[in-house]
Amino acid sequence: MNQRVIWVATIVLASVSVSFSAPQNGAKNAREQASVETARNNVASPSVGPSPVSGPVYLIGPEDVLDVTVWKEPDVSRIVPVRPDGRISLPLVQDVQAAGLSTQELADTIHEKLRAYLNNPQVTVIVKEINSQRVFVVGEVLRAGAFPLLPGMNILQALSSSGGFTQFADVKKIHVLRVRAGKQIELPFNYRDVLKGDKPEQNVRLEAGDTIVVP
């Protein structure tokens, strides 16, 4: 009789133990599942940071030389100069305005015009020679002359293209000559101060036609 009571009690205690352990295991599994879901969400939906800032876009100008390529259409593809009126000439489409456009905008324009003759033409435009956007460096530099005006180019960058200064250069009295509204203005540039970071506002972004004078 006592053995039967002990046996029954043992079964009851085992059942109670299982009933308590099951919810604990269930909670543990729920927590693990939640962790997995969180990890999935983090991978599937990464945090969105600030959009990358694109640099200045080069705009085509007169006297630039362009390589216009139409995929699998060598008879239409051409290396062409931009005329003084800002236009280029191509087979099928004749004259196309190029000056003032980016290479992608010009490619899109040519694509639309060629659609009347070709099935989904793939057009690529590359600037082979930059002749319209130029700046000039004169005076006491090792290599004076005209230099392509790259997007965002400032005075320091243009001076680096000239190869450095001669021993007679007065680098504290450099200036930029610029034409505004038909009048010539002068922008001072103290090379030593700018290098030291004292006058960063003098290191202005250049414009087409600017002339840097190194006395």
Image: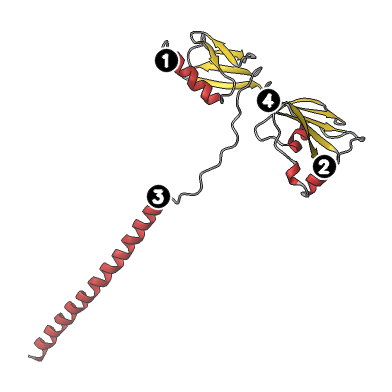
| Disc 3 element | loop
- Whole-angstrom CA distance, mark 2 to mark 3, is 50 Å
Q: Earlier in the sequence, mark 2 or mark 3?
A: 3
Residue furthest to the left in view is 1
- Density class for disc 2 (Cα within 10 Å; few <14, some 14-19, many ≥20) is some
Q: Is residue 173 above or below residue 17?
A: above
Mark 3 near mark 4, Cβ–Cβ under 8 Å?
Answer: no
Classify mark 1: helix, strand or loop. loop
* Residue 98 shown left or right of residue 209 in the figure: left
Mark 1 residue type: Arg
Q: Which residue is mark 2?
A: 190
Q: Is residue 182 above or below residue 175?
A: above
Q: Residue at x 49, y 49 (%)?
A: 49
**Label 3, on which residue?**
45
Percent x, y of residue 177: 78, 31
Identity of the residue drawn at 86% across and 39% down: 173
Query: SS class of the residue under badge 4?
Result: loop
